Amino acid sequence: MTKVLVVDDDQHIRAMLKLFLERTGYEVEESRNGNEALRSHRQHPAALMLIDLIMPDKEGLETIREVRRADPNVKIIAMSGAGHGNYLTAAKLLGANAAITKPFSMDEIITIIRSILEADLQK
């Protein structure tokens, strides 16, 4: 089962993504911020991380930079609210495989996840 780490300070978004992704067949872990995400990923590496960009303690861009240094193979999808387009562009420059604007539909996120994971399998 593919493991996904959802990193977002909004409990409702984490819960919604966890429920949907588990129903879709993924194993899901949750983190409230970048510090938690880095600890979690070191202890139990995920194949893919969904990382919010605007969070307290350790924000998403810094988290992406540190994750990339520690694990260049993990797949990363950056998430941010409308109006944060520059952050999403920066996330891709720092190594995110994809970036998505909130709010998004579950169909959108699962399509992105599948395309990233399938592209990796075809290598």
Image (tube, grey):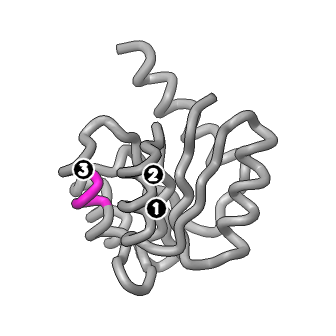
Query: Can I make out residue 85 in this image?
Result: no
Instruction: Compare marks 2 and 1 and give the one earlier in the sequence.
Output: 1
Residue 34 location, quadrant:
bottom left
Q: Would residue 109 appear left or right of 43 to someone viewing this image?
A: right
Q: Secondary structure at mark 3?
A: helix
Residue type of the residue flagged with mark 2: Ile
Between the C-alphas of marks 1 and 3, the distance is: 13 Å
Label ID, residue 68 = 3
Q: Is residue 28 left or right of residue 50?
A: right
At x 26%, y 70%, the residue is 62
Distance between mark 2 and mark 3 Cα atoms: 12 Å
For the magenta stretch, what is the residue range? 64-68
Task: Categorize mark 2 by other alpha carbons within 10 Å: few (<14), some (14-19), many (20+).
Answer: many
Proximity of marks 2 and 1: CB atoms separated by less than 8 Å: yes
Q: Which residue is mark 1?
A: 51
Q: Position of residue 64 (x, y in %)?
A: 30, 59
Distance Cα–Cα, label 2 vs label 1: 6 Å
Residue 14 appears in the figure: yes
